[in-house]
Image: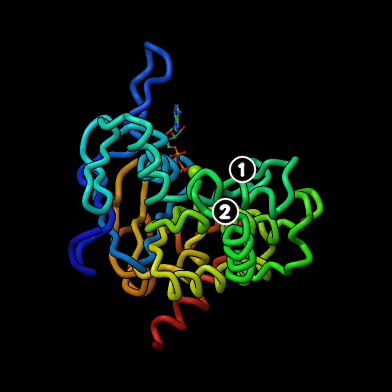
Amino acid sequence: MTGTAHDPILEMSHVTKTYQVGRSRAPIVAADDVSFSLRAGESLGVVGESGSGKSTVAKMVLGLTRPDSGSIRIAEKDRTVRVRGSRARLDRAKAVQMVFQDPYGSLDRRLTVTAALEDTLRRHHPQQSRSARSRTIAGLLEKVRLKPELAGSYPHQLSGGQRQRVAIAKALAVEPDVLVLDEAVSALDVSVQAQILTLLNDIRSTTGVALIFVSHDLAVVSQITDSVLVMYRGVVVESGSTHDVLVNPAHPYTEMLLSSAPGPGWRPERVAALRARFAAS
Ligand code: ADP
Ligand code: MG
């Protein structure tokens, strides 16, 4: 990658995505003129209620969904999915990796932790020797703080938090520039959530990977992001530093997100405590 450290590694400009469900109905605008940029090591939160378009944005970054209009630039190359060769897909896979809410869905149940990591490494580093691969796997397990004795375990033998660590290790195995985490801690207990968030913060500072952290839980987002986009029905209604958005929300929707409890992950008293802490800092 050329360019300076200050150049964005990812830039989404005026991206719109609509879904047509049935002929007679009006199309759903899942993303409406969404723009943002991300630099190496930065962490961006995407928050909003269910259905606000967060996953649509994440999927477009990952190249899993095509935008109707606008562009998504990753590092130097324009990867606005008009480039469709297998080589282009591999580049994108390398640059951007994902971790979803349910690692059961993304981990192969027939593969042990080691086998899952071997599988990823073999595809992305076909030239790597067996011994180098073993060392890489040991390093990845250490990075996600998974005990070496769990290397031979299958997904069903692991806890939810451990499975999510494996999913993160698999994503890191290809040394991505950007890690997209879509509700990655939403299914975990609060204490496990905190461990994973600490881990992600450490990984971000040691590797320089940028994070796009998608969550309906503003309290979780506030613990791991520098800046946030607040989405409402496909529109970014507010964006800015996490600190400013939490302490001084400019949009009534953000205020509503902060003060109401629309879902199980929302804990207004937790948000209130966080806001007080942010305001004092
Ligand atoms: P979020 O992740 O914030 O819950 P989504 O991006 O999943 O929101 O969805 C945004 C809107 O787009 C919702 O109204 C959803 O129903 C709609 N949508 C998402 N994916 C599809 C799809 N594949 N087909 C039709 N509608 C979709
Ligand atoms: Mg979603």
Q: Which residue is mark 1?
A: 106
* Crowd band around label 1 with a 10 angstrom C-alpha radius: few (<14), some (14–19), many (20+): some
Q: Which residue is mark 2?
A: 170
State whether label 1 is within 8 Å of ligand 2: no
Q: Are marks 1 and 2 in contact (CB under 8 Å)?
A: yes
Res 62 quadrant in image: top left
Element carrying mark 2 = helix
At label 2, the amino acid type is: Lys
Distance between the alpha carbons at the discs numbered 1 and 2: 10 Å
Which residue in the rendered view is the most extreme toward the bottom?
A: 280
Give the mark nearer the N terminus: 1 vs 2: 1
Left or right for 84, reference 195: left
Is the image coloured rainbow, by chain, by secondary structure, or in one colour?
rainbow
What residue do we see at 24% from left, 52% from top? 11
Q: Nearer the viewer, residue 212 or 20?
A: 212
Above or below 252: residue 32: above
Q: Nearer the viewer, residue 94 or 269?
A: 94
Where residue 218 appears, x then y in whole percent? 47, 62
Res 146 quadrant in image: bottom right
